Image (cartoon, rainbow, N blue to C red):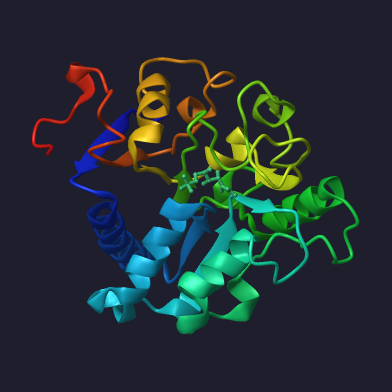
Amino acid sequence: MSTPQIVVHRDKELMAQAAAARLITKIVDAQAARGSASVVLTGGRNGNGLLAALAAAPARDAVDWSRLDLWWGDERFLPQGDPERNATQAREALLDAVGLDPARVHYMPAADGSHDDADAAAEAYAAELAKAARPEDHGPVPSFDVLLLGVGPDTHVASLFPEMPGVRETERTVVGVHGAPKPPPTRVSLTLPAIRAAREVWLLAAGEDKANAVALALSGAGEIQAPAAGAYGRSRTLWLLDAAAAARLPRDLYPPASP
Ligand SMILES: O=C(O)C(O)[C@@H](O)[C@H](O)[C@H](O)COP(=O)(O)O
């Protein structure tokens, strides 16, 4: 478990641009070291804001997009192409504009595919992750280079909501989620054990409606009550915030050179 590091940016646009710059560097470094990189995407405005900032970043072509594996941390269980699907939104924000290798883009199954419910979709995705894991990963999912997460106002991450069965899962790597408080109610999500297989976990939160959630998750709350508190990477856990989302952090956690 890595101790969270907190970086505060003036506003959410700067946060997205700085996170995009950071992600470009991370992917380029991983590709230089290992030949390829792997990133887990999130849904939500902040995750998509990062992807849009990446699409607009001058250095974006420093990345070899054909040697990038993309996975999803969660998906809204809707028909393929639905505008509310996280995959659709990621494609619009970035993916359609770069030269990805389709075989390396690991979409979660859609509601109209061969998987008739979210539990079957979760099982299929778990199998795809297991197939991609190598012996050096020491587990059923690959050691993702960076796993991105938005943070909900109730401290949810991916589709793991406080007190619900998904956040209590300790065995499976992917679960179907039913009755989610954020629409749509049916979703597919990586579990905390799968999230924690990542080398780096980056959590993104902007806006004053996130201030309580951020303060709670970083002040020692348990992961069942505050799922974001259980989201950490093997070597690094980074909280990327704007000033509004950081406003209720205890003073001793607030980074020194922040706005
Ligand atoms: O499918 C989703 O909705 C998510 O992946 C969810 O976990 C999201 O990341 C947070 O709710 C934060 O969303 P915002 O960035 O829009 O606040």
Q: Is residue 145 above or below residue 177?
A: below
Q: Residue at x 91, y 56 (%)?
A: 116
Find residue 135 and report its horizontal and vertical position in percent. Answer: 61, 51
Position of 18 with respect to 54 (left or right) is: left
* Residue 85 in view in this figure: yes
Question: Residue 92: horizontal and vertical position, in percent?
Answer: 52, 74
Is 67 in front, or is 212?
A: 212
- Camera-side residue of 49 and 169: 49
Residue drawn at 68 percent across, 55 percent down: 129
Q: Is residue 224 above or below residue 33?
A: above
Could you tell me which quadrant the C terminus lies in? top left
Question: For the point 52% across and 23% down, which residue is it?
Answer: 226
Which quadrant of the view contains residue 213?
top left
Figure quadrant of the N terminus:
top left
Q: Position of residue 186 (x, y in %)?
A: 76, 45
Pick the residue in front: 67 or 89: 89
Would residue 31 be visible to someone looking at this image?
A: no
Task: Indicate the quadrant where residue 71 lies.
Answer: bottom right
Residue drawn where x is 60% and y is 72% of the image: 104
Left/right of residue 121 with respect to residue 229 in the rendered view: right
Image spot of residue 185 (x, y percent):
74, 42
| Left-right relation of 143 to 160 | left
